[in-house]
Amino acid sequence: MAFGLSSRDVAAFKFLLFMAVLYGLLSMLAYSVIHMKFIKPLDSKAPLDRFSEARAVEHVRILSKEIDGRQEGRPGLRKAAEYIKGQLEVIKDRARSSVRIEIDETTVNGSFNMIFLQHSIALGYRNHANIIMRIASADSKDTAPSVLVNGHFDSPLGSPGAGDCGSCVASMLELARLIVDSGWVPNLPVIFLFNGAEELFMLGAHGFMKSHKWRDTIGGAINVEASGTGGPDLVCQSGPGSWPSYVYAEAAIYPMANSAAQDVFPVIPGDTDYRIFSQDYGNIPGLDIIFLLGGYFYHTSYDTIERLQPGSIQARGDNLISIIKAFVNSLELQNTHQTNSSEVTANISKDERAVFFDYLSWFMISYSRRVAWILHSIPIFIFFVMLFFLTYSRTHSLSATFGDFTKGFLIHAVGIILAIVVPIIFSLIKVQFSSQTMNWFAHPYLAFMMYIPSSLIGLLIPRIFWSHFPLSQDISVAKTSKEALSDEARFWGAFGFYAIITMAYLVAGLSGGFLTFVTSTFMLPAWISFCLSVKSYGRQSLRSTMFYMIPLVPCLAYSVYFGGFLSQFVIEKMGMMGALPLPWGVYVPDFVVAVLIGVMTGWCLGPLLPICGHWLARKSILQILLHLSVLALALSSQFFPYSMSAPKRVVFQHTFHTAGSSQIVEASYEFSVVDSNSLLFLFKHAPEVARELNVPSDFSFQSAVLSKRQNWMALFPVSFLFSNSLKFPAKADDILEQYEFFPKLSVQEPYSNSAKGPRRIHLELSLGSLEEVWVAVLNITGPLSSWSFADNVLPVTETADGGPPSYILRLSGASDENWNFWLEANSSQALRVELAVIDQKLVEPAKRLKGLFPEWVDVVAYSGFLSSYSF
């Protein structure tokens, strides 16, 4: 044969080409679904009884472009509240007499303890604005059960917040308009909550749930959020109970939901208002619906209106109006009084955790956990039924049949494991011989090019060695061929593998078992089709193989859709997952992506291997896959990891250590990054910044001044994502000209002391003359026994870098008045308080330094004021 290839090698390459074309077409389908290519956005002239993306985007334009900065402490946040309220007033004026609309602006205050990013923290807040609209029929009672739709209008530090969460607010405004203009009169009230303090750890939602007059009427909650600028508007969390996911499954026009997201959501660095409504303070059944793609721009200055993905807001709006109507009409919707009066029934339903998933946004399947116990047990039941059936139909010993099934199971399991291990090896080699990591970050296709061929190598290695494991069954007794018994053992072994994983998910209390359940379900008709085709075309015929593959195509399409979406999401998020300590931290992102693509490749190709594996399990195929992997590794090293469409995140704190109200002890520039390419990489590729900071060419972490973790206390607990932060000297002259007074903590009253009892210290926190304060953080160490926050309950202590146990308190909210509070110590030992305040206003030298960074870097910059006290 040509090039020294045998006829079987030629057939193998043809089959490999066919597989590449098949998965290429499936990938194109998945890409069009994930990026909303099938959605046609409606323009601003669309009928008033339709949701229009263009009308919503106009709201986004005003909120993110015309209004400058919607961060706490900046004037733009108040302007955004006024704009939202003004738009609601316009909608109210157009309402018919059959509809009763109430608009309420409230200022919320409070304090509470919470766990955020697995760290304990106390939160105190004041003067945060919530704008609420209640739409009900004219004869609706004030106590009628209602549906809450929540979104926040504040934005994170340094971001215009077009996606997060200008898109949410804009969608809600257009929905409110649509309800009024369409003539629909909801038989139960719909409440829109535009809350002004989500980025400060869900304070607006907490204030609503603790104090608003309508809080006890809420029977269902829909939280609208964005972790990017578009893509699937995914239901990431649902509950308590199963009925919210049932309602969504029936009502959503473009269902986008996945209960597996609930399994991994706690791992993602972040949280949403959903936890306040449905977990921490409300126990309200609801949905957490989030834009997940476009994560490159999440919490960056690139989160602009131009980055919004067309079609995403249209799909969100069409879904939400249908879901709201379904929630309102649901018999499960109850207010707090009704829920409490049927407590036993409610507890039974709320204990269930639904299993749900969409299929390519075409339709959705949802069922309760009790149903899952039945459905997900069927594959393992079938496995054992077939084990006994094949044993006794051929008068074989059970041990022989079970032995062959076990060999098939182990061969498949080892293949899946190697599909993960081999890409890991390639990722470690790549990082070891490269000067940078994450080359795939701005070019996700590079990750697929590098790790899919290597993963396929791992999948095929056990199949090559299958012939070295003799069958336990006697061919003469079975009265069938060795090839038939081998196919049977491999198939049922693989089937058993997926069946066991499905059961493991279920027993562990997780909701992602549907992934392998779907795989095992589609494998059964594929096996039946193959067995029937063998009678006509033979076992080694390509036609028989096609008959096995065709029934699996819907399953493969879903695997590619889910795997592609998950891979893209994780790759985008790797830019903000944290910088781990050197030297091992540099390996982590490539390791994670290699594992992920290995798992997804195993899942997408694994069901084919029992029958199709013999076409590909040849040394010539492994050689070409190895060459492709090495070529992709070499090619990827030529790509720069970042771009304007995939920026590197840098945190820049202009730090001032102060004493008293007007003295600067030390000033410095401090920098940190949140991915594995360190500041050394940044200075190498940002020479203007390096020159400004006087960074020499032989600069290293050994010669640098490291920034201490406590200097980043104002960002706690996000500061735990930082590693190898650096510190450079700066001048203090400009800040002394900009501000007359700095933050200061002082004793307000003489100590309240007794001879044997605790001593109470009354303190006053002044923020000085700072103009754009975002947050103030207190780190308290010593014999603290009580305080005036969180109903006098202390949070769990925190420790960092071997320091003493401490209590962390975050204070936020603009006011002309100072903070007044008390701390109580249970001994004469001193209480030490470290104060950190973030001011969003920069002095001119810091602005110039920020402007020197290249366009592929997103810089979150602010001034940090640090001071220490002992009482």
Image (spheres, grey):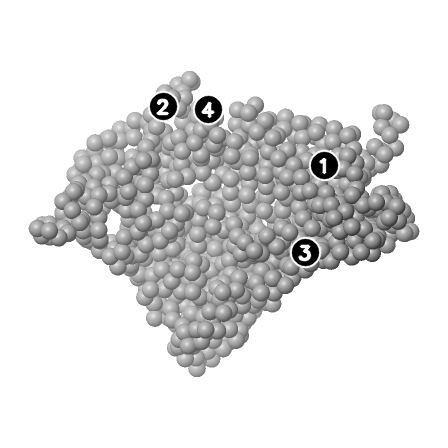
On screen, residue 31 versus residue 643, left or right, reads right
- Say if 279 sits above or below 553 in the image: below
Query: What residue did someone put label 2 on?
Result: 704
* Viewer-nearest residue: 736 or 132: 132
- Circle 1 is placed at which residue position? 462
Q: Residue at x 43, y 82 (%)?
A: 139
Identify which residue is drawn at 32% across, 54% down: 113
Q: Where is residue 144 in the image (x, y as percent from the top left)?
A: 43, 77
According to the picture, the residue beneath numbered tag 3 turns out to be 380
* Amino acid type shown at disc 1: Pro
Discs 4/1, front: 1
- Of circles 4 and 3, which is in front? 3
Please name whichever residue, 305 or 360, is drawn nearer the observer in this view of the structure. 360
The first of marks 4 and 1 along the sequence is 1
Mark 4 is on which residue type? Lys
Please name the residue that numbered disc 4 is placed on: 684
- Callout 4 secondary element: helix
Q: Residues within 10 Å of mark 1 (few under 14, many from 20)?
A: many
- Along the viewing direction, whichever of 30 and 527 lies nearer the viewer: 527
Q: Are marks 4 and 3 in contact (CB under 8 Å)?
A: no
For image coordinates 77% across by 47% down, the residue present is 400
User: Which numbered disc flags the more N-terminal residue, 3 or 2?
Assistant: 3
Q: Distance between the residues labelled 3 and 1?
A: 24 Å
Q: Which residue lies furthest to the right in this view?
A: 536
Cα–Cα span, label 3 and label 2: 59 Å
Report how far apart the C-alphas of labels 4 and 1 lie in the structure: 45 Å
Left or right for 219, reference 494: left
Q: What residue type is labelled 2?
A: Ala
Q: Residues within 10 Å of mark 2 (few under 14, many from 20)?
A: some
Q: Nearer the viewer, mark 3 or mark 1?
A: 3
Q: In which quarter of the image is the N terminus?
A: top right
The local secondary structure at tag 1 comes to: helix
